[in-house]
Amino acid sequence: MPKVDNATTKQAESIWRSPDGAKEIFKVTIDVGGEEFQAKTYSKDISKVGWTGSLESYEKEGKFGSETFVKQPQKEGGYGGRGNYTPKDDKAIQAMWAIGQAMNWFSNRASDKLEAKDVKELAIILNGMVDEVKTGSVDTVAEVAGDETNEDIGKEIDRVFG
């Protein structure tokens, strides 16, 4: 992918938008050192007339053959144009799932007295079970349920929350 510095957008127009509006393709005229060329981009930043910065060009197959697209080059720690990007935190997602499952378990039992410590304990056990199935590790489960075997973990859940 050829990279150019000090590119400036001279003209831009939207030529396609997805039905849900999430993606849009712009036809842009870019000036690099006094020479202009046309390309397409998905970048809203690049599509603003007057934008100046570094670009990478790449070819993409279209309806009528190869088309030239431009994008901001990858920056250290992420990609251009996505300064606020946060990588997915699988452990946080897993923990939120376990908490939700614990809340559902208690609400399905119509318990008058829902205590945060009970939800937390069950969520830790469920979260640990995901790790156990995924990796074979039982560290998180052992913290709450002790050093019981897998068979005893089910009994512990019934004892604490049954």
Image (cartoon, helix red, strand yellow):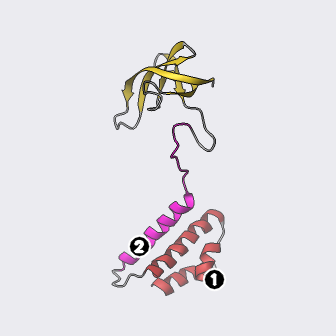
Task: Tell me which numbered mark, 2 or 1, is placed earlier along the sequence.
Answer: 2
Counting labels gives 2
Which residue in the protein does label 1 denote? 148
Going 54% across and 53% down the picture, which residue do you hit?
88
In the figure, 143 relative to 99: above or below?
below
Query: Residue 14: x and y, percent?
Result: 38, 25
Nearer the observer, 62 or 23? 23
- Residue 31 lies in magenta, yes or no? no
Instruction: Assign a secondary structure to mark 1.
Output: loop
- Residue 84 lies in magenta, yes or no? yes
Please state which amino acid type lies under the numbered disc 2.
Met
Where residue 53 sits, quadrant-wise, is top right
For the N terminus, the image quarter is top right
Tell me, yes or no, if residue 101 can be seen here: yes
Query: Residue 13: x and y, percent?
Result: 38, 22
Going 34% across and 38% down the picture, which residue do you hit?
20
Q: Which mark is residue 22?
A: none
Distance from Cα at disc 2 to Cα at disc 1: 24 Å
Which residue in the protein does label 2 denote? 103
Majority secondary structure of magenta residues: helix
Horizontal side of 97 relative to 132 (left or right) equals left
Q: Which residues are magenta?
A: 80-109
